[in-house]
């Protein structure tokens, strides 16, 4: 029986306007009645996830920054910082070769450069990072580096950013997170590995887990659970990896699929 459900946020759980489905609170109550945990698994900052799910901060498990930081009850369960020297090197090279807007994602907060504080960037930044600080130089940041992100406002990250930084694959992981963003995290870590760490901590198996995703930073989730769902709006490669397909995020596909899982008895029996 399913004991925990992991879900990506953008393009998956959130609708086309970036909002939670209106039926979300009711579905969460239904899951709670069956003793099933819910776990947002996102490239978003931990504090951004907390803001989105303020009333569930003591109920959910949060897989933030593409799985590099996992917390429950505001306590760290797992993290995977990258070597600081290498992270700073990637930041410097990315700035020099791509000219993209850049974010250093730390455990404490996210950091941007003061000279990149343009409105088009800040508007996008604050969708995913609610705790930020502008600095003159990334080298002055006193924090672990758990992710480095690059943003292209023209939605051509696969052409303008990724080709310049993909050479770091092997030492790190360079992932096209959307048409706008390229994320770089430590080697051997991803949402799938984070799920495996949660499974180990909770002593549950892949057959007791479901996951929903839509883009390439969700790919490893599909092989870490049995009930793997790609959204109908998902990247074709993610669909190839998933066992099942959910309706699109615009159709509230995660909510529909969860209710189907409950109705089919795959979430066990309702608790008294």
Image (cartoon, rainbow, N blue to C red):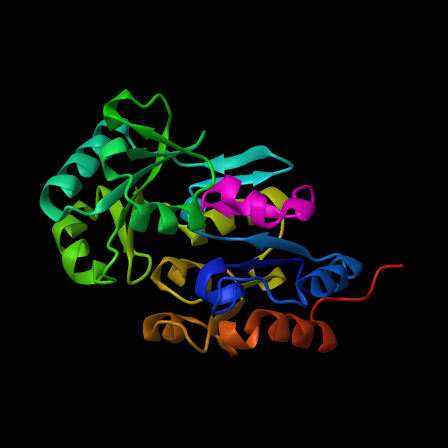
Foreground residue among 45 and 206? 45
Q: Is residue 1 above or below residue 50?
A: below
Can residue 192 be seen at all in this image of the molecule?
yes
Instruction: Give yes or no for residue 48 being in the magenta stretch.
Output: yes
Number of numbered discs:
0
Q: Residue furthest right?
A: 272
Instruction: Indicate left or right for 13 with 180 as reference.
Output: right
- Residue 35 inside the magenta-drawn segment: no
Q: In the rendering, at what x and y percent does residue 42 appear? A: 46, 52
Q: Residue at x 75, y 57 (%)?
A: 32
Instruction: Please report the bounds of the magenta region as a residue range.
Output: 44-64
Between 155 and 201, the residue placed more toward the observer is: 155
Q: Quadrant of residue 73?
A: top right
| Identity of the residue drawn at 50% across and 53% down | 41
Farthest residue, direction left: 97
- At 57% from the left and 43% from the top, the residue drawn is 50
Q: Position of residue 196 (x, y in %)?
A: 50, 50
Q: Quadrant of the N terminus?
A: bottom right
Does residue 171 lie above or below 256 as drawn? above
Q: Position of residue 101 (x, y in %)?
A: 24, 45
Q: Is residue 224 visible to us here?
A: no
In the image, residue 211 sits, relative to residue 236, either above or below, namely above
Q: Residue at x 41, y 60 (%)?
A: 218
Left/right of residue 264 with respect to residue 155 in the rendered view: right
Looking at the picture, tell me which residue is in the foreground, 151 or 261. Answer: 151
101 vs 212: above or below = above
Q: Position of residue 116 (x, y in %)?
A: 24, 39
Which image quarter is the C terminus in?
A: bottom right
Going by the image, does 239 lie left or right of 207?
Answer: left
């Amino acid at each position: 029986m399913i004991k925990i459900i992991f879900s990506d946020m953008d393009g998956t759980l959130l609708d086309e306007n970036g909002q939670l489905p209106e039926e979300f609170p009711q579905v969460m109550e239904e899951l709670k009645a069956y003793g099933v945990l819910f776990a947002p698994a996102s490239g978003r900052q931990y504090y951004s996830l907390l803001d989105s799910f303020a009333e569930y901060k003591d109920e959910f498990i949060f897989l933030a920054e593409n799985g590099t930081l996992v917390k429950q009850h505001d306590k760290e369960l797992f993290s995977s910082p990258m070597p600081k020297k290498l992270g700073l090197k990637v930041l410097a090279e990315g700035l020099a070769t791509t000219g993209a807007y850049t974010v250093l994602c730390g455990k404490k907060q996210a950091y941007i450069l003061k000279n990149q504080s343009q409105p088009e960037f800040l508007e996008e930044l604050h969708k995913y990072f609610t705790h930020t600080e502008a600095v003159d130089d990334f080298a002055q940041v006193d924090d672990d580096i758990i992710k480095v992100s690059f943003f292209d406002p023209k939605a051509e990250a696969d052409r303008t950013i990724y080709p310049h930084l993909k050479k770091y694959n092997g030492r790190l992981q360079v992932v096209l997170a959307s048409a706008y963003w390229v994320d770089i995290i430590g080697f051997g870590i991803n949402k799938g590995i984070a799920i495996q760490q949660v499974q180990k901590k909770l002593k549950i198996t892949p057959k007791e887990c479901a996951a929903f995703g839509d883009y390439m930073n969700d790919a490893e989730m599909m092989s870490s659970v049995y009930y793997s769902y790609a959204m109908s709006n998902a990247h074709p490669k993610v669909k190839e990896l998933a066992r099942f397909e959910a309706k699109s995020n615009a159709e509230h596909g995660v909510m529909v699929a969860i209710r189907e899982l409950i109705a089919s008895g795959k979430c066990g029996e309702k608790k008294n």
